[in-house]
Image: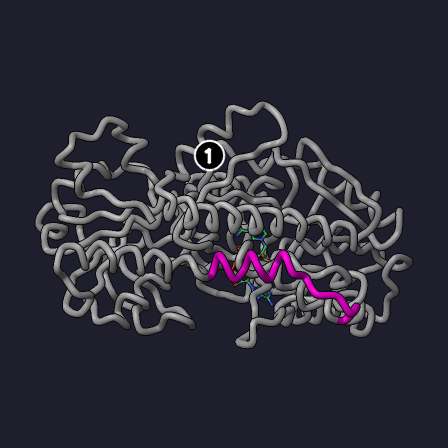
Amino acid sequence: MQIAIIGLGYVGLPLSLQFARSGVSVVGLDIDPTKVEALNAGRSYIKHIAPESIQEQVSAGRFTASSDFSLIREVEAVIICVPTPHNKNREPDISYIVDTGRAIAPHLARGTLVVLESTSYPGTTDTDLRAVLEADSGLKAGTDFHLAFSPEREDPGNPASDVKKIPKLVGGLTPACTAAAVALYRHALDTVVPVADARTAEATKLLENIFRGVNIALVNELKQVYAAMGIDIWHVIEAAKSKPFGFMPFYPGPGIGGHCIPVDPFYLTWKAREFGHSTRFIELAGEINEGMPAYVVRRLGDVLNTQGKPFRGSRIIVVGLAYKPEVDDIRETPSFHLMNLLKAQGSVVDYFDPYVPVIPPTRENAAWAGTRSVAWSREDFARADAVIIATAHRGPDYPVLLDWCPCVIDTRNVIRQLQPDLPPARAARLWFA
Ligand SMILES: NC(=O)c1ccc[n+]([C@@H]2O[C@H](COP(=O)([O-])OP(=O)(O)OC[C@H]3O[C@@H](n4cnc5c(N)ncnc54)[C@H](O)[C@@H]3O)[C@@H](O)[C@H]2O)c1
């Protein structure tokens, strides 16, 4: 079997390799020539994807990367994994999907299956994508070619997460489209779950992300309320976890990041307006989560105040720039919000992240491009008035920060996890936010 996977990022690359490992011949298509070149040379540009796993499939001839969309003519199925960000007004930007549809359509052969994996609002597959595919190919979806949606459930950076084992939802335009998509994914994945249609699959993906966003907001709110009452949220969550039913732990933090949770729920908010509905849970959760960096900075200000220090001129190091542990992905990371807020207060801000040695150019945080991570050393950290642990990658001995710096704000509770019995001298320098 020959397939094409379009968009070789955090989702498309691991999926391509999984299909290739399963004996399917995969052509990966991307408009970024540097990615195409890197992959064909067996290089990885994603930290948690080993170059060897790419080299193995490239040299076996099961995976090649290309920018030539005419190769679509030769394949039986096309899977689309392109970005779905917000535009500058925080509305859905499905232009990448539409552009990809336009690039596919002239080469679409009768009988081909097209599957969209990019997260979007219900109706994207059977309305927006369908329209461009049909207009530019002269073929009819559901009759001349199959069309389906299958949401990605990638958990980057989690070593226990295996693409092959994560159940895959598929919903087609017609029952035949669903059946074609089920047959496709069964080549590479252990469990494929057919659902009623493409809209159901799209809506399910949004439910999963909204569920996370809302529950994280809940613990973020409780963290603030309990802190004011002198109650430790981390102890409360640990205790609640002893309940064997009806409770699932979520953990507070300095805000939410990544391509999914801060973005996807608002795709539904936007679409809901068309139907005269508002999505109050989503909006409230967004408001609370977005307010977390400011809360952390306020807490730091209180601590600095007790030490007789103003923000202005203080040196602060934010530990962890990536939005979650064990990844190098800085999209939507709350660490940038922390850094921007601190800078606005007049602090001199540095960061530490072993996976982001230098900040690459980004659209929203262009001013930080080229800034380098400080070293994990007493020398670099001793210059800081305070440290905020925003993301705790595995590896560093975080409790040692309490010897190096007068004030450590731990938003992830990582220090106590590594050293539950802190000696009083260390404990006196630790705060939570
Ligand atoms: N990253 C995750 O953990 C995750 C999890 C679940 C769902 N998703 C969803 O999957 C989709 C892809 O996310 P990602 O994290 O892989 O994005 P990404 O930015 O890592 O990768 C997208 C790739 O698409 C390429 N691309 C852009 N426009 C293109 C076009 N017109 N033709 C060909 N290639 C094009 C880019 O060059 C890039 O390599 C998004 O909708 C996202 O919401 C991501």
**Res. 99 in view:** yes
- Mark 1: give few (<14), some (14-19) or many (20+) Cα within 10 Å: some
Closer-to-camera residue (230/343): 230
Q: Left or right: 143 with respect to 382?
A: right
Q: Residue at x 19, y 37 (%)?
A: 427
Name the amino acid, label 1: Ile
Percent coordinates x, y for residue 108 in the rendering: 77, 63
Q: Which residue is labeled 1 in the image?
A: 237
Closer-to-camera residue (87/370): 87
Q: Left or right: 130 with respect to 140?
A: left
Percent coordinates x, y for residue 20 in the rendering: 60, 41
Q: Residue at x 56, y 60 (%)?
A: 66
In which quadrant of the rendered image does the N terminus lie?
top right
Q: Left or right: 281 with respect to 410?
A: right
Image quarter for ligand 1: bottom right
Closer-to-camera residue (130/318): 318
- The correct choice, above or below, for 309 with respect to 21 in the image is below
Q: Is 287 contained in the magenta span?
A: yes
Q: Residue lying at the far right in this picture: please name it.
A: 143
Q: Left or right: 127 with respect to 215?
A: right
**Res. 75 in view:** no
Q: Is 213 contained in the magenta span?
A: no
Q: Residue at x 43, y 55 (%)?
A: 255
Q: What main secondary structure does the magenta stretch of the protein show?
A: helix
Q: Which portion, as a residue range, is magenta?
A: 274-290
Closer-to-camera residue (164/347): 347
